Image (cartoon, rainbow, N blue to C red):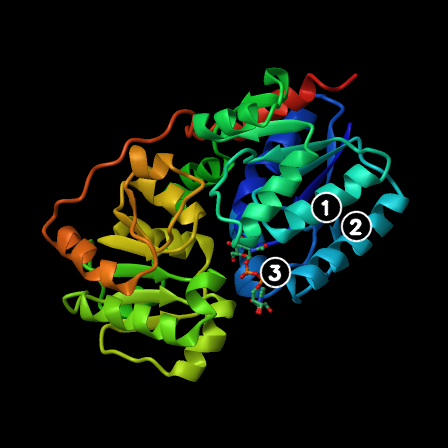
Amino acid sequence: MLIDIIAGARPNFMKIAPIAESIQHAQEKGYNIHYRLIHTGQHYDKNMSGNFFEELGIPEPDINLEAGSGSQAEQTAAIMIRYEKVLMGKKPDLLVVVGDVTSTMACSITAKKMNNIPVAHVEAGIRSGDLTMPEEINRMVTDCITDYFFTTSETANKNLKKAGIEDNRIFFVGNTMIDTLLKNMPKLKQPAIWATAFLSNKEYLVLTLHRPGNVDDAQNLKLLIETIVESSRNIPIIFPVHPRTNKWLQQLGITAANLYVTEPLSYLEFNYLVKHSKAVITDSGGITEETTVMNVPCITLRNSTERPETCTIGTNELIGTDPASIKPILNKLFENKWKRGTTPQLWDGRTAERIVDILLTMIV
Ligand code: UD1
């Protein structure tokens, strides 16, 4: 069995790492299962891509499509055209895609249209209901043509069943991103900013922002950051900046004595910072899962989430995108009234093993 595994953008790399590793383990046990790792090149900077491969021990991609940046349509088209050329050569028996980035959707469509190659979607079925997010469209389109749905939550299972997907195509396996987190917990690395910003345990905030809705309107971004600074009681705020956000930040020239803007951090450094922080303020989805597992308070600047379990049983609170909501929630944090989290079912570090066990039953 030959499997194409697609990795395109930063949040994909930690999700595919344990799958590739589990396939290798199966090979070592003598199973006839092989993979080609295909990097679409959606993210290409060393600190958005290369560092993750090195730190997580992911083998070099077999193929790099080098699709690069562009508008949603340009990026989707570039990935499809380049992956189709790959498929004109050797075809895999199965395509494995993860998450919700443009590469996930583009490669699924290409494989499905080309000889009906079966698609397995890891992290299938989650929905925010917010069609202004490109990720939501990627999730919906991918799941429409997915054959095997590997899910992280009961909510995802329910969403898929409601959409008419038969039970025997839904596999509730857990969360491969958490496999990577648990495996790497002992290796987390203190970043240089720890010393330069004089950080100490649980006495600083981590901030990440990259959603177009939050960062593409310069005045809104400015107001968000200024409000966070004003409400932070002067504890350090560490802000590793995504390239999309950096473009605006440079123009706005926002500075404050306790705001430390850095390049995107490596996986081991970023999660070290998160683990020891007082709280994280973010608009990411994946980070809300990691903070839940590490039991770190998380404040999400979004109106909806496709990961409701991070709020219902985890440490996450959704506060929307209105800067006026920031001060009250930070006051609650500083009064030490934050809820404690429970780890969601099957987020136990063994998800990739379960996925590969299921894939092995498909070998004829
Ligand atoms: C993408 C994903 C999002 C994910 C995020 C994490 C989609 C639709 N969105 O959004 O789900 O949470 O990645 O990072 O797939 N850029 C660089 N260097 C890079 C990569 C990008 O400078 O290595 C620049 C691009 O030129 C562009 C901007 O960053 O200006 C945005 O990149 P893009 O891949 O379009 O989407 P993200 O916002 O990163």
Drawn side of residue 39 relative to residue 253, left or right: right
Q: Amino acid at mark 1?
A: Cys
Identify the mark at residue 107; answer none if there is no mark: 1
Identify the mark at residue 43; answer none if there is no mark: 3
Q: Is residue 89 visible?
A: yes
Residue 255, image x, y percentages: 30, 80
Q: Residue furthest left?
A: 335
Quarter holding the N terminus is top right
Q: Is residue 65 above or below residue 295?
A: below
Q: Is residue 16 above or below residue 278?
A: above
> Between residues 322 and 314, which one lies in front from this camera angle?
322
Q: How many C-alpha atoms fall within 10 Å of the one at disc 1: few (<14), some, or many (≥20)? A: many
Quarter holding the C terminus is top right
Q: Amino acid at mark 2?
A: Tyr
Residue 197, image x, y percentages: 26, 70
Q: Earlier in the sequence, mark 1 or mark 2?
A: 2
Tell me which residue sits at (44%, 37%) in the image.
Answer: 178
Between tags 1 and 3, which lies in front?
Answer: 1
Which quarter holds ligand 1?
Answer: bottom right
Q: How many marks?
A: 3
Q: Secondary structure at mark 3?
A: loop
As measured in the structure, the alpha-carbon distance from the residue carrying label 1 to the one carrying label 3 is 15 Å
Residue 194 sits in quarter:
bottom left
Q: Is residue 57 visible?
A: no
- The residue where tag 2 is placed is 83
Label 1 with label 2: CB-CB less than 8 Å: yes
Residue 155, image x, y percentages: 45, 29
